[in-house]
Image (cartoon, coloured by chain):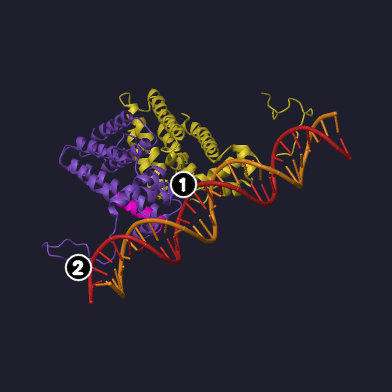
Chain colours: A yellow, B purple, C red, D orange
Amino acid sequence: MVQNNSKPIAQAPRQKARGRPKAYDRTTALKSMRDLFWEQGYAGTSLDDMSAVTAMNRPSLYNAFGDKASAFKAVLEDYVDDVRQMYMAAFAPDVPVRDGLTRVYETAIHIYNREDGVGRGCFMISAALIDSVRDRDIAAKVLEALHEIDRAFRWRLKVAQQAGELSPDADIDTLGMVASTTHNAVAVRMRAGEDLAVVRRFVAQTVGLICG
Amino acid sequence: MVQNNSKPIAQAPRQKARGRPKAYDRTTALKSMRDLFWEQGYAGTSLDDMSAVTAMNRPSLYNAFGDKASAFKAVLEDYVDDVRQMYMAAFAPDVPVRDGLTRVYETAIHIYNREDGVGRGCFMISAALIDSVRDRDIAAKVLEALHEIDRAFRWRLKVAQQAGELSPDADIDTLGMVASTTHNAVAVRMRAGEDLAVVRRFVAQTVGLICG
DNA sequence: AGAGTTTTATGCAAAATGGTACAAAATAAT
DNA sequence: ATTATTTTGTACCATTTTGCATAAAACTCT
């Protein structure tokens, strides 16, 4: 299939697509819908809601994303891809491990907070998780993403151990899981409205325990 | 207000309530609706669903529980009360702390599993949590229950420390939070469909870390 | 200018939803 | 037997919801 939106090597005119131009940008629409689903969940969000935040009418929504469930999954995929980039940067072993872990949790706190400071928790561990029983594809996606974070924590601690930052005797597997489950709890508690100072306190305690 | 359903001290006839007798039992209805909300969430559950599992028609549902949101809150309250009893028993300091912690997590695993083995996670950390942004009363209820479990873990570890089971130097506050956040993660992961052996493995690792 | 193509705007159908009204049923009291 | 009271059964309402159909708009190509 020939990509018809590839950038020309030179600025030579390319053949233009026929038909009326799209009035929406798919990525922008995904981000707008993300906020909706994040706060209301799938079942609590209507197509009228989606239409309003994206400024797209029904045919455009259906043409761009398929039915409601498919739109939700596209939003989930988009979220996971976005946060993966952010976490990859946060896990980079370019600072001491204690600072590195703290940075990961601060990245989470940043993601889970709305611009106005209201905590929504993790899109995945609320909006997606509630639908895990209903839709096994979503459950699998959530579980895979959780495992990805597990691996990242274990890897970061392994790098730290090899660099001499952690004791050679430290049980990296266990500490990695403790770090990862703490990350889950940050999501849960922020959605429940926990005070950020409280969240940061137990994060610091856990980082302290992990780093010895 | 006089209770008109109190059991007679003797089997002497008491004044009976007038009118047609109720065909439902409130507690049974709460339990039936719990399953629904647990799996489908509030927004994904309709009054027809509720009517079907309780065998109660609309007037009975409204008379017994008020509107849909009130019914949900009654179910949440009932769940929290039920699990509190189970956790109180599990936290009892009548076994070594390692066994005691394990018993707490096994209690959670038991609660979060359906009879057929499908994990639904915690009612609170899925069905209620998704509605935390929409309804601040629910958020407060969830947060308070989370704090209650935090305190229980810290208390159990303090008792163990005073009994000489844990080092006098152990940071009970931190270890208590690690135990409690692990408990949150059990709920999240079970809802996502994690294999129970995997759950039990990271639980055992964490218990090992906490008990030294 | 007209034809072809794609997208947008609008309307609509069928079903679902939360909640209310009212009559019938099932009891107690007289 | 009749009246009073409470609950159940049924119907209904107004609104919302998801998804589809169709005409008009906005572009390209000839």
Kindly identify the amino acid type of the residue bearing the numbered disc 1. Arg
Question: Which chain does the numbered disc 2 sit on?
Answer: B
Within 10 angstroms of label 2, few (less than 14), some, or many (20 or more) residues? few
What type of secondary structure mainly makes up the magenta span?
helix
Across and down, in percent, residue A83 comes to 51, 36
Which one is closest to the eye, mark 1 or mark 2?
A: 2
Residue labelled with disc 2: B15
How many numbered badges does the structure rendering display?
Answer: 2
Within 10 angstroms of label 1, few (less than 14), some, or many (20 or more) residues? many
Across and down, in percent, residue A111 comes to 49, 42
- Please state, as top left, top right, bottom left or bottom right, where the N terminus of chain B lies in the image: bottom left
Q: Which mark is drawn over residue B7?
A: none
Kindly identify the amino acid type of the residue bearing the numbered disc 2. Gln
The answer to which image quadrant residue B120 occupies is top left
Q: Which mark is drawn over residue A120?
A: 1
Question: Which chain does the numbered disc 1 sit on?
Answer: A
The residue stretch that appears in magenta:
B66-79
Give how far apart the Cα atoms at labels 1 and 2 are: 53 Å
The answer to which image quadrant residue C8 occupies is top right
Q: Nearer the viewer, residue A169 or B198?
A: B198
Note whether B49 is above or below A157 in the view shown: below
